[in-house]
Amino acid sequence: MNFKSEEAAGETYLARALKTTIPLVLVETVSSLYSLADTYFVSGLGEEALAGVGVAGYILWLYTVVFALFQTPLMILVSQSIGAGMREKARRILGEVCVKGGFAMIMVTVAYYLASPAFLTIQSGLSGAAYDNALSYLLIRVGGLPVFYFSLCFDTAIIATARTKITLLVNTIGLIVNVILDPLLIYGHLGFPGLGVSGAAYATVISSVTTIPLQLHYLRKLGLKPSLDSGESFFKKIISLGAPAFLERLVFSLGNNVYAGVISRISPRVMAAHNIGLRIESLIYMPGFAFATTASTLVGQKIGEGKVEEAGRVGFETIRLGALTMGLLGLVIAVGGRALVEPFSPDGEITELAATYLLIAGLSELGLGLSMIVGGAIRGAGNTKIPFLVNTVSLYLFRVAPSILLSKSLGVIGPWLAMFMDVYARGIILLVVYRKMFHKLAVKHV
């Protein structure tokens, strides 16, 4: 498919992509600041606390894969419904996802809570204070998963309308609450109990609770208040679209937990450095999620309108803009890594390790941007199977297996180099598929 549009049309696609993406970039930056705030305040508790929170973060990433079973089809179906002018259908889809997905999330949360101590032992190899910190943080965050699920669903529905300034406002308020609560609950200032890493977890859960009333308010204003009316069920369609996305996230998160396990077994100091570098890098790759979401939204709306050619073009403009942005920002963290990690690092050795991670990660951001944004555009077109296949094969072939092998001879540099290979492989393959097969991938589901 030829995505080279006329100049005027190209400017229109680019302008729309920018209008939707800029607030989302800020939203994702805000999201990354949640984790960065926890890292900053927890760093004062020492390397074992940092390592524990870092390992817990990888496990939470695995646990939240179930969100994709409902979030991905929600984005596709609501954006296509909005594009087709069927807002009432969008309300019913959101209501069904909230009720049936919410029930599933409560059941899953109970299972996660019971399994977490054993899974943490198997996954991380941590012991002593590092294990205790990881488990304390993990169990509190697991208890808050239903809250995060509903907040995510409401946020996704708002984004599907392309009214991204609303989601920026709501998430910024949540961040402010988190930043205020972190030092109070971690260290016990102003008469609050000093809870250590548990305080960081409570702060994150409470801040998410504060966003839900605001999201419901804006959904009502947008005419998207969840509808619980009985009638046509979309559950089969939701599952058919969500299953590949869920499997992709599950397999991907399992692979990343193996990857994290390889790193944590080298030493707690190495894991602490990796966690610091990863949290700082999130300032770059979180905007990648914003561009991916924009691609899904705009492509989905055009598919809903029945304009496949325009869908391909607006998706390609978003891919081009997002990958370039991430590549340039990656150069910034590659060059300035040491200065960026020093405020978060408890000592010089961890600083050097984290700076090395940022050098490698920064140079990989262009490939990461391509993989994230092209995948988002393909999902917005209604196809969730291709991203699943490409991401799964690349992750295990280029990241997991080489990490295990290279760590024996290169230490932590081995897994970091494997990460570099993986993101470029995924990005290039998905881009080729998008450019050659977009018309075959695009499917209207509403």
Image: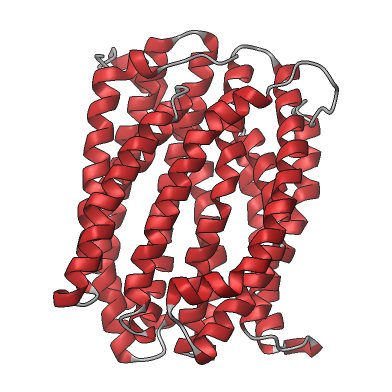
Instruction: Identify which residue is drawn at 34% across, 36% down.
Output: 389
Residue 332 lies in quadrant: bottom left
Instruction: Identify which residue is drawn at 70% across, 23% down.
Output: 90
Query: On the rendered structure, is 293 left or right of 173?
Result: left
- Residue 161 visible in rendering: no
Query: On the rendered structure, is 431 left or right of 375?
Result: left
Instruction: Identify which residue is drawn at 41% across, 20% down.
Output: 12
Instruction: Identify which residue is drawn at 22% across, 47% down.
Output: 424
Q: Quadrant of the C terminus?
A: top right
68 above or below 256?
above
Observer-nearest of 230 and 20? 230
Picture coordinates of residue 177 (x, y %)?
A: 70, 66
Residue at the extreme top of the image, as rendered? 306
Q: In which quarter of the image is the N terminus?
A: top left
Observer-nearest of 276 and 102? 102
Picture coordinates of residue 142 (x, y %)?
A: 66, 64
Picture coordinates of residue 272 (x, y %)?
A: 40, 80
280 above or below 285?
below
Residue 186 lies in quadrant: bottom right
- Residue 326 visible in rendering: yes
